[in-house]
Image: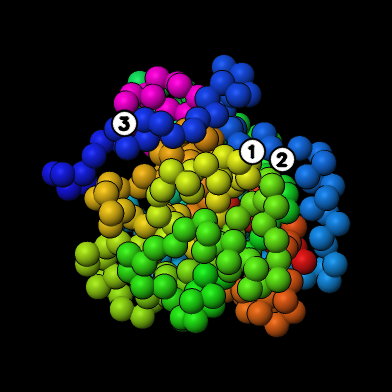
Amino acid sequence: MTDTAPSLTELLKDAPSNWGKWGPDDEVGSLNYLGPEQVIAAAGLIRSGKVFPIQRLIGDPKGDPVWPSRKPAVRTQIMDESTWDSEDAPAFPGGLHYADDKIEAFLQGSTQYDALGHVWYDGKLWNGYDARSTVGGMDKASVEPIADRGVVGRAVLLDMARFRDKDYLDSAETFTHEDLVACAKQQGVEIRKRDILLIRTNYLQKFFDVGDEFYENFCEPGLIYSPELVHWFADMEIPNLVTDTIANEVTTDPETGVALTLHNALMRNLGVAFTEIVDLEELAADSAQDGVYDVFYAAAPLKVSQGSGSPVNPLVIK
Ligand code: UVW
């Protein structure tokens, strides 16, 4: 945030809020918009049977793009065939050998669901929960209730990179909800109420092209805050925003100087679930071929006790 940037309190003082809409104990927010009716309707979108797992590879030998204060996951081999050469190796009847490994990873360090309580301002999380409930682990609005219900619905792929005729969007490039609607129109698909939005920028390709330079003056492209955009998300009852960037929005708003405004306006205030760092490349290439942009989407984040996020491998099925 720059010295002159307004506070989120000031900026969002008249912004819409869904706090209390699903009761005082709610921890899944706008995912409540996805009920049996939406699941059954989404199932009707399965036509060719093509399945697209949209998680990025954890521990990719080419590197993992992560938010600057985080580190990529480290996988460590604990047991392998060499273990069994040792004299102290356990012996199992029948001659069993096995491999074991572990990962040390930020829960937000790869393709992930954010818990609704992952960000806040003014000492209050989603639904008004006290931010002190995050101390030592999230007692409220953690990722657990999202994992407990899963996420299934109709999703619309919005290929902003193709729409702007680019390999990938530029650093700090922005777009609005009106651009999303125009992109959908060009793709021949309609964004409907309660749709999950899958937005492709292909920006993380830059990480693989330029290496560590990616983090210099770090500012991802993405949706930019405006009161109209927040009202559009509220009116459209968007349950889940899924993108192929690390932060789902332009990192620092070039107009206000505020960082991650939409995390707060959409996630904290409206309860929109955020899914980040997905890989939409195969899906987008396929959709450019077959012209199908409305798809069945299902995701089950891991049940991590008190987690502020969880790795996930969402499935898109056509
Ligand atoms: C932050 O909110 C800092 O990160 P993410 O983009 O993972 O939500």
The quadrant holding residue 124 is: top left
- Disc 1 to disc 3, C-alpha distance: 25 Å
Q: Is residue 46 visible?
A: yes
Q: Is residue 5 above or below residue 82?
A: above
Q: Residues within 10 Å of mark 3 (few under 14, many from 20)?
A: few
The magenta segment is 118-131
Task: Write the residue at 74% across / 79% down.
Answer: 290
Q: Nearer the viewer, residue 58 or 175?
A: 175
Question: Label 2 amino acid?
Answer: Leu
Q: Are marks 1 and 3 in contact (CB under 8 Å)?
A: no
Residue farthest toward the top in the current orientation of the protein:
24
Indicate left or right for 121 with 228 as reference: left
Task: Write the residue at 44% across / 34% down.
Answer: 15
- Disc 1 to disc 2, C-alpha distance: 6 Å
Q: Residues within 10 Å of mark 1 (few under 14, many from 20)?
A: many
Instruction: Using the image, tell me which numbered label, if any, was put on residue 34.
Output: 2
Q: Is residue 158 visible?
A: no
Q: Are marks 1 and 2 in contact (CB under 8 Å)?
A: yes
Q: Residues within 10 Å of mark 2 (few under 14, many from 20)?
A: many
Q: Which residue is mark 1?
A: 31
Q: Which residue is mark 3?
A: 9
Q: Nearer the viewer, residue 80 or 210?
A: 210
Residue 103 place in picture, x, y as percent: 45, 53
Per the image, label 3 sits on a secondary structure element best described as: helix
